[in-house]
Image (cartoon, rainbow, N blue to C red):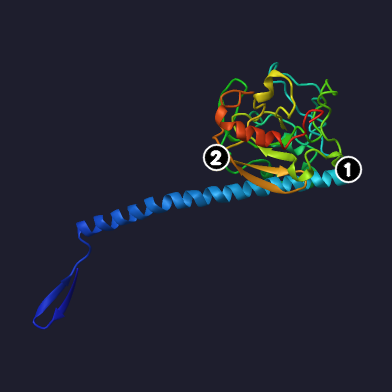
Amino acid sequence: MVDIRYKKGFIRLGGFTLIELLVVIAIIALLAAILQPVLSRARAKAQEVSCLNNLRQLQVCAKLYTLDNDGYLPPNRYVYDLGTGSPSLGFSEKLTWCAGLAPYDTNTVNIERGLLFQYNRTTKIYRCPSDKSRVRTKEGQTLNLRRTRSYNMSLSINGAPYTDKALYPTSFARESDIDNPASAELLFFVDVHEDCILDSHFGIPPRGWPYDDRQRWWDLPAGRHSQGCNFSFADGHVEHWQWAAPKIFTELGQLVRQDEIEDFLRVQRCVKPAKGF
């Protein structure tokens, strides 16, 4: 308390009253409530941009690999069969841009022995910053470890061979083979839903697929970027897509919901079609 002499008396200058303090606290709380959504959107946008940058760097690695290997695209032969839980035809830990199973890898060893790691030795570019998923054991226990990978490579990029080549020939092996769709429209790397990602191969039934699973998400793309997903393309550019419907994981190889058919067809147009389409 401070006393200031004024003429014959005193003027007392005190601190804030309790009511004044409560008013100030209420104003601060109100401002925080108003700014919180703005800050959250800004943080989410920054993470989206960081994810796009990761995909751009991976795309540069893929291009460097192609230049070093006579025009051949990076091998994408790490595939698991959802029905059997065993390796599919063409599976090989040595013929892949990235080995390992994302939900179970407790370290970055599998990333480091992939064929692209030599071109950028930063393992952080393999994980989306918005991906908060944790490593789990095959028995279902969740560990307090952030996963090491969020991205897969499209089945159209030097993927595993298929038995029925008359219907669905092997995907583009060389960069010069790319013709339908064109390089600017051909998916390369995909940000995959955290509950769906397993191996490093992103699959979707191509246009003209005659079997019963032609309306299924073999792999579900992510929706963590404000109901959107990030992709890179064979010509080197990256894009953020906003989904018409949220991406909700229910099971591996799940059916396409009626409200997301538009999204499904959009992705499907960006992979190599079955023969004759």
Q: Are marks 2 and 1 in contact (CB under 8 Å)?
A: no
Q: Nearer the viewer, residue 256 or 191?
A: 256
Q: Position of residue 97 (x, y in %)?
A: 78, 36
Q: Position of residue 168 (x, y in %)?
A: 81, 26
Q: Which residue is mark 1?
A: 71
Left or right placement of residue 7 versus residue 133 in this view: left
Residue at (66% x, 46% y) in the render: 239
Q: In the rendered picture of this protein, how many numbered marks are placed on residues?
A: 2
Q: Which residue is mark 2?
A: 227
Question: Up-down: is 206 above or below 51?
Answer: above
Left or right placement of residue 108 versus residue 15 in this view: right
Question: Up-down: is 209 above or below 20?
Answer: above
Which residue is situated farthest in the front direction here? 276
Task: Give residue 233's quadrant in the image.
Answer: top right
Left or right placement of residue 70 versus residue 119 in this view: right
Task: Give residue 19's quadrant in the image.
Answer: bottom left
Q: Nearer the viewer, residue 195 or 135?
A: 195
Which residue is situated farthest in the left direction here? 8
Neighbours of disc 2 within 10 Å: few (<14), some (14-19), many (20+): some
Q: Amino acid at mark 1?
A: Gly
Q: Secondary structure at mark 2?
A: loop
